[in-house]
Image (cartoon, rainbow, N blue to C red):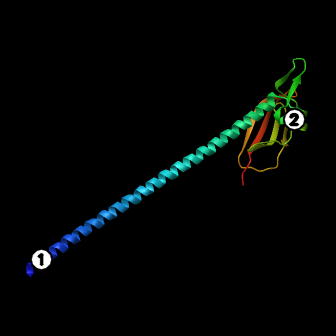
């Protein structure tokens, strides 16, 4: 009887030892799995943040590009209906527009609010370099947080001037 009790207690001890090792192993696996999940989560958040910042940079580059194209159009073309699309003087003898030679009265009277897709022109500011005269023509009362100002050196009615066009992105609600 004594020997059977000893055998049973040895078996119980062995079973108990295996259970302790199993618990330690299971705990180790769970901790490793949780650490792996946190690592994957951090990696996904990093990729998401990188993607969103690159998307914002691309949107800003597109706004910069559109603003540059628009001010280039203003100083290199002539448009009787809207000066934002072209405000150059026309030379009838040469039958061409005079690039960077703008007409002040045309800018002042023919500048109309304009919207192109997802952006609009907020204002035009003319600063004469030889005098202290500075004039701003407000074209839109819309508010936007994403605006850019583009400047160009021009000649307006024979005077050197800097023309600044402020364009803004239309905010989506």
| Left or right of 34, for residue 134 | right
Residue that numbered label 1 is attached to: 6
| Left or right of 103, for residue 10 | left
Quadrant in which residue 63 is drawn:
top right
Can residue 55 be seen at all in this image of the molecule? Answer: yes
Of residues 52 and 13, the one nearer the viewer is 13
**The C terminus lies in quadrant:** bottom right
Residue count near mark 1 (Cα–Cα under 10 Å), binned few <14, some 14–19, many ≥20: few
Residue that numbered label 2 is attached to: 107
Q: Position of residue 149 (x, y in %)?
A: 74, 40
Q: Is there a contact, CB below 8 Å, between mark 2 and mark 1? A: no
Q: Secondary structure at mark 1?
A: helix
CA–CA distance in space, label 2 to label 1? 107 Å
**The N terminus lies in quadrant:** bottom left
> Vertical placement of 32 versus 119: above or below?
below
Quadrant in which residue 39 is drawn:
bottom left
Q: Position of residue 16 (x, y in %)?
A: 22, 72
Q: Position of residue 110 (x, y in %)?
A: 89, 37
| Left or right of 90, for residue 71 | left
Depth check, mark 2 against mark 1: the one in front is 1
Q: Residue at x 72, y 37 (%)?
A: 66
> Vertical placement of 140 versus 21: above or below?
above
Specify the label residue 121 is tagged with.
Answer: none
Q: Residue at x 74, y 49 (%)?
A: 144
Mark 2 / mark 1, whichever is N-terminal: 1
């Amino acid at each position: 009887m004594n020997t059977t009790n000893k055998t049973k207690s040895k078996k119980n001890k062995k079973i108990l030892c295996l259970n302790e090792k199993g618990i330690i192993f299971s705990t180790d696996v769970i901790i490793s799995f949780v650490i792996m999940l946190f690592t994957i989560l951090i990696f996904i958040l990093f990729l998401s943040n990188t993607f969103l910042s690159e998307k914002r940079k691309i949107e800003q580059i597109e706004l910069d590009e559109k603003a540059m194209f628009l001010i280039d159009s203003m100083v290199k073309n002539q448009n009787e209906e809207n000066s934002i699309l072209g405000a150059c003087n026309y030379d009838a003898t040469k039958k061409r527009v005079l690039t960077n030679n703008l007409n002040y009265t045309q800018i002042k009277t023919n500048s109309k609010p304009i919207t192109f897709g997802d952006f609009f022109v907020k204002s035009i500011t003319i600063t004469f370099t030889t005098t202290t005269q500075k004039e701003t023509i407000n074209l839109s009362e819309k508010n936007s947080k994403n605006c850019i100002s583009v400047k160009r050196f021009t000649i307006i009615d024979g005077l050197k001037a800097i023309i600044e066009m402020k364009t803004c992105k239309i905010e989506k609600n």
